[in-house]
Every structure is written in C-alpha cells, then in structure tokens.
Amino acid sequence: MTKKSIAVIGSEVCGLSSVKCCLDEDLEPVCFERTDDIGGLWRYQTTVYSGKKRPDFSTSGQWEVVTECEGKKEVNVFDGVMVCTGHHTNDHLPLESFPGIEKFKGQYFHS
C-alpha cells in the first residue's frame, strides 16, 4: 500500500510538530517553507500559491498544491494538506491594551 502524501505548509513550531505527527502515523509529509531559517530536508524558499480540491475530490480526497521555487511553478497532488503558517509570522502588538504605552521609554517587541 502506498503511503498517503501530506503537504505541510510552514516549518515553524506548528509545521515541524505536524511533520512529526505525520511520520508517527506512517504518512509521507512534504514541508514547504518560504524562508531559509531552519535546516533539513524541506523545500525551502518555496511560495505556496494555492491548495484546492481536485475535480475528483469526492472520490479521491486529493488536493492540488501550486508552488513556486526559483522561478519554477509546480503543481503537486497530495492526499491531504496541513496549513501551519501559525500566528507567529506577523507581529501582533495589541498596544491599545496597554494604557500609557505611548509614554513608555523602553523597548517592546513581538514574541
């Protein structure tokens, strides 16, 4: 029996733990990451443009994932997709929740 392939989009905390869970379940994960921050066997500096159900999704359950890496677009078919871009990608600074922040002279940052 062929292993089911899973597209994991994002290789930060959520993505890496998803890859681990896929491996534990005997699935075949392929992790896509836009940046080159973490080393390993991932497809780095790959932009994922879309993930959509294939025309035969009702019978196959498969997805088409469109990516681009080094100027080359590619369409791959996966049995599942895990979107693991997380909330750590973009700064979330709810400064309005901190009365007096405009007077604070120290440094604050997203974490």
Image: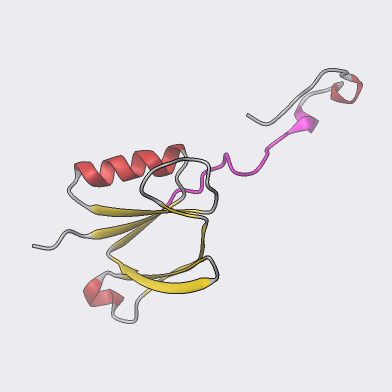
Q: Position of residue 23 (x, y in %)?
A: 23, 45
* Residue 104 against residue 11 in the figure, above or below: above
Quadrant showing the C terminus: top right
Residue at x 45% of width, y 48% of height: 84
* Residue 64 against residue 31 in the figure, above or below: below
Residue 90: in magenta span? yes
Residue 85: in magenta span? yes
Question: Which colour scheme appears in the figure?
Answer: secondary structure
Total of numbered circles in the picture? 0
Residue at x 29% of width, y 40% of height: 20
Residue range (magenta) = 83-97
Residue at x 21% of width, y 60% of height: 4
Q: In terms of depth relative to the viewer, which is nearer, 85 or 47?
A: 47
Q: In terms of depth relative to the viewer, which is nearer, 98 or 68?
A: 68
Residue most toward the right?
A: 103
Q: Position of residue 43 (x, y in %)?
A: 42, 55
Q: With 32 as the anchor, is 91 left or right in this view?
A: right
Quadrant showing the N terminus: bottom left
Q: With 24 as the anchor, is 29 left or right in this view?
A: right
Q: Position of residue 39 (x, y in %)?
A: 43, 41
Q: With 72 as the anchor, is 6 left or right in this view?
A: left
Q: Which of the 4 image quarters holds residue 62?
A: bottom left
Residue at x 79% of width, y 22% of height: 107
* Residue 16 against residue 109 in the figure, above or below: below
Q: In terms of depth relative to the viewer, which is nearer, 9 or 86?
A: 9
Q: With 45 as the anchor, is 106 left or right in this view?
A: right
Q: Position of residue 32 (x, y in %)?
A: 43, 55
